[in-house]
Amino acid sequence: MTVRLTRVAEQAGTIEIVRSAGLGRLAPLTATFVVLAVVGAILGLVSAAGVGFHAGQVDGVDWTGSLAFGSVVALTFLLMALITVILAQLVPTAWSARVAGALALAGGFALRPAADTQHHPWLQWITPWVCGPLWSRSPPTAPCRWSSHPWS
């Protein structure tokens, strides 16, 4: 989706047509970020609702934890979209931008278990899936405590 909104539109000439209407240089990129933010918010809300509707039915699942889960899903989507936007500007074609985005996603997935098993705190901070071990100082079934989050 990110590549379609950036690199594909650039290759098809759509951005030149839009810019010829008098819009600013950053208008297409701003519109892309708005669309991605809305999709990320919807994805996070749907994820939070899907988990939250099981509150009380599954041990340790409550609405606070489901909102935390939904925010992690939305922020991870936005982070990967931002990385893909940057990579789409560095490579020459839409196909190579898709491959670069997929490799970035695969690299994040590969770094996550390495960070967890090798006990490298700095590696846990640079992976896109940073929230797990840093937030959970308790078993996964324990209720979510917002006071244990890094920003509190």
Image: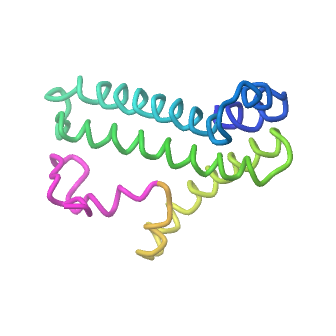
Q: Residue at x 23, y 59 (%)?
A: 149
User: Which sits in the foreground, 62 or 92?
Assistant: 92
Q: Residue at x 22, y 55 (%)?
A: 139
Q: Is residue 66 above or below residue 112?
A: above
For the rendered model, the colour scheme is rainbow
User: Which sits in the foreground, 65 or 43?
Assistant: 43
Q: Is residue 135 magenta?
A: yes
Q: Position of residue 51 (x, y in %)?
A: 29, 30
Q: Position of residue 137 (x, y in %)?
A: 22, 63
Report the number of discs: 0
Q: Is residue 117 left or right of residue 89?
A: left
For the stretch drawn in magenta, what is the main secondary structure?
A: loop
Q: Is residue 44 magenta?
A: no
Q: Residue at x 49, y 71 (%)?
A: 123
- In the rendered structure, which segment of residues is drawn in magenta? 129-152
Q: Position of residue 33 (x, y in %)?
A: 54, 38
- Pick the quarter of the image with the N terminus: top right
- Pick the quarter of the image with the C terminus: bottom left
Q: Is residue 116 left or right of residue 55?
A: right
Q: Is residue 47 left or right of residue 21?
A: left
Q: Is residue 48 above or below residue 125?
A: above
**Residue reaching furthest to the front:** 22
Asked where in the image residue 4 lies, by quadrant, the reply is top right
Q: Is residue 152 left or right of residue 129?
A: left
Asked where in the image residue 53 lies, by quadrant, the reply is top left
